Amino acid sequence: MNTSKSGVVTRMSTQGAEWHAETDTVRRAMRLTAELNKLSFDDAIKVRALFSELTGQEVDESFSLIPPFYTAGGTRIRVGRKVFINQCCTIYDMGGVDIADLVMIGPNVNIITAGHALEPSRRRAYIEAKPIVIQRNVWIATAATILGGVTVGENSVVGAGSVVTRDVPPNTFVAGVPATVIRSLDQDGAD
């Protein structure tokens, strides 16, 4: 598991072979998430199997996800042990998403690595993606959004409805739009 972002920005033209290959990845993800989203919380073994197929890596038996779940790729998502993802979460992983051990992700959370150019003339020309790293023992509360290029530090909490546009220091509580540090958190060893 990568616990620090590489700083690499991926820029993909929406015209050409690379983009067409990416759209095949999106089609695969849409098919697999449609299957996954037919399952219930009681189908944990099947959910883990489909999520493993989606990401291309076997997830730990301690991994838990409550459908529905949405992604535009899946193959660039990495998850650790004892990760919990609540219902209606979206992970757009073109830039890569690393989720470390003991992470809890609340319902309706968006983890979005990709975006478009701000300039109108270039907006449809390419997609730019930046990695997201969520370190150990993080809690991302309901309806938060994490944007590309961000690392959420170990033991941190992202408040409900927050939009995270910059790195979150370890052991902090952040909230707001854009998210800012509200206070430091005491360290008390999680397992």
Image (tube, rainbow, N blue to C red):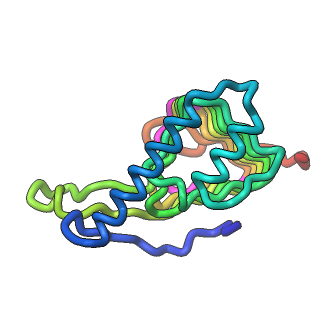
Residue 146 lies within the magenta run: no
Viewer-proximal residue among 87 and 105: 87
Q: Residue at x 21, y 71 (%)?
A: 16
Q: Residue at x 46, y 41 (%)?
A: 163
| Residue 163 part of the magenta-drawn span | yes
Residue at the image point whose x is 62% and y is 60% from the top: 56
**Magenta span:** 160-170
Looking at the rendered structure, the number of numbered marks drawn on it comes to 0
Question: Of helix, strand and loop, which mostly describes the magenta segment?
Answer: loop
Q: Residue 127 appears at what percent x and percent y?
A: 29, 61
Horizontal and vertical percent position of residue 67: 60, 30
- The N terminus appears in which quarter of the rendering? bottom right
Q: Please determine whether, in this image, residue 72 is positioned above or below residue 8.
A: above
Left or right: 33 in relation to 83? left
Q: Report the residue that reaches farthest toward the left.
A: 121
Look at the image and tell me whether residue 110 can be seen. no
**Residue drawn at (33%, 57%) of the image:** 23
149 horizontally vs 65: left or right: left
| Lateral position of residue 105 relative to residue 19, left or right | right
On the question of residue 98 being in view, the answer is yes
Q: Tell whether 45 sits left or right of 124.
A: right
Q: Is residue 111 above or below residue 106?
A: below
Q: Give residue 132's position: percent from left, percent from top.
A: 54, 58
Percent x, y for residue 21?
35, 66
